[in-house]
Amino acid sequence: MEKEHARCVTIWDEQFPALLKKTAAPPVVLFYLGELPEIWSPMIGIVGTRMPTQYGRTVTEKLTAGLAEKGIDVVSGLARGIDTIAHTTAIQRGGRTFAVLGCGVDVIYPPENRRLHEQIQQNGAILSEYFIGAKPDAVNFPRRNRIISGMCLGILVVEAGAKSGALITANFALEQNREVFAVPGSIISQRSIGPNRLIQQGAKLVLDLDDILEEIAPKLVAREMQEKPLPPDLSDADKSLLIRLSNEPCHIDQLVLELDQSPAVLLGQLLRLELTGLVKQLSGKMFIRL
């Protein structure tokens, strides 16, 4: 682990990205160069073609700049094209950016991104589930896409062909209950087939930054709520329940599944927390944190 000063964080560590930890297939360990994001730091993944048009470049720069200026971290894969533009713009606008690789964190790929690789370490981190020195392998890249989407509140697809890896990332995002955003493009452009099809299938059409912000705003509030200090006199069980709840209504059945408790036990806890003003019950056995 000394090579390139790489470090690692495991899924059992507090510093492990919080949203990623909650996905169905999180990596057990993440190697990294740089500084890990704060566990509740808001992130958006930006992905797309390796050969963008000028339209794609301009849109990526505009939206990435807006996210960075709002304090939203940008996640991508350090590939050529849209990934590189997103990372570079985030840094230029004073934001933080995180690159998830399909090889070891010490491996520069593509080789022309050596300088960007170094810059990201100073303004975020290079991350990978693969061991130090692991070479790029075609099978690794689709798999790493679940980490990109898993870390984020949503994924933005700018330009992508019909078989683009960006669509794999979008599919992972859907499976992980993340927002999927897509920038519309020309119906005769091969590079717009991917996002246009995503929009056709229900992805959020993005015309400007506000289209992204209005979708993630409730989740940002939920994250702030999860960071609120808990009353010190609560039991560990009550603390675990409060940490899970936010301003987004959650059904009792979902809490039963996630916390591995019986409905009777959880309802007793929820009633107690409601009487102390920490929780509110809505209709249909839905609960929110106050």
Image (cartoon, helix red, strand yellow):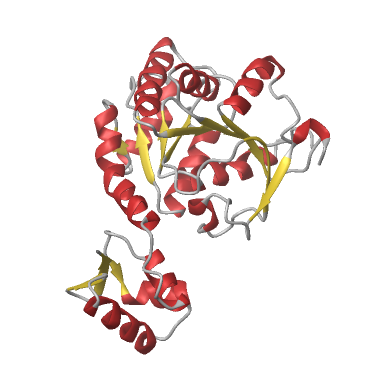
Residue closest to the far top: 54
Q: Position of residue 58 (x, y in %)?
A: 39, 14
Q: Residue at x 45, y 13 (%)?
A: 53
Vertical comparison of 262 with 206: above or below: below
Residue 284 in which image quadrant? bottom left
Q: Residue at x 32, y 49 (%)?
A: 219
Number of numbered callouts drawn: 0
Vertical comparison of 129 with 14: above or below: above
Residue 6 in which image quadrant? top right
Residue closest to the far front: 232
Q: Position of residue 97 (x, y in %)?
A: 52, 30
Whether residue 163 appears in this view of the structure is no
Q: Residue at x 40, y 34 (%)?
A: 72
Considering depth in this image, is 140 or 281 the residue closer to the camera? Answer: 281
Q: Position of residue 283 (x, y in %)?
A: 17, 74
Considering depth in this image, is 186 or 240 the residue closer to the camera? Answer: 240
Assign the N terminus to one quadrant of the image. top right
Q: Residue at x 45, y 21 (%)?
A: 94
Left or right: residue 1 versus residue 26 is: right
Assign the C terminus to one quadrant of the image. bottom left
Left or right: residue 104 versus residue 52 is: right
Residue closest to the far bottom: 264
Q: Position of residue 251 (x, y in %)?
A: 30, 72
Whether residue 68 appears in this view of the structure is yes
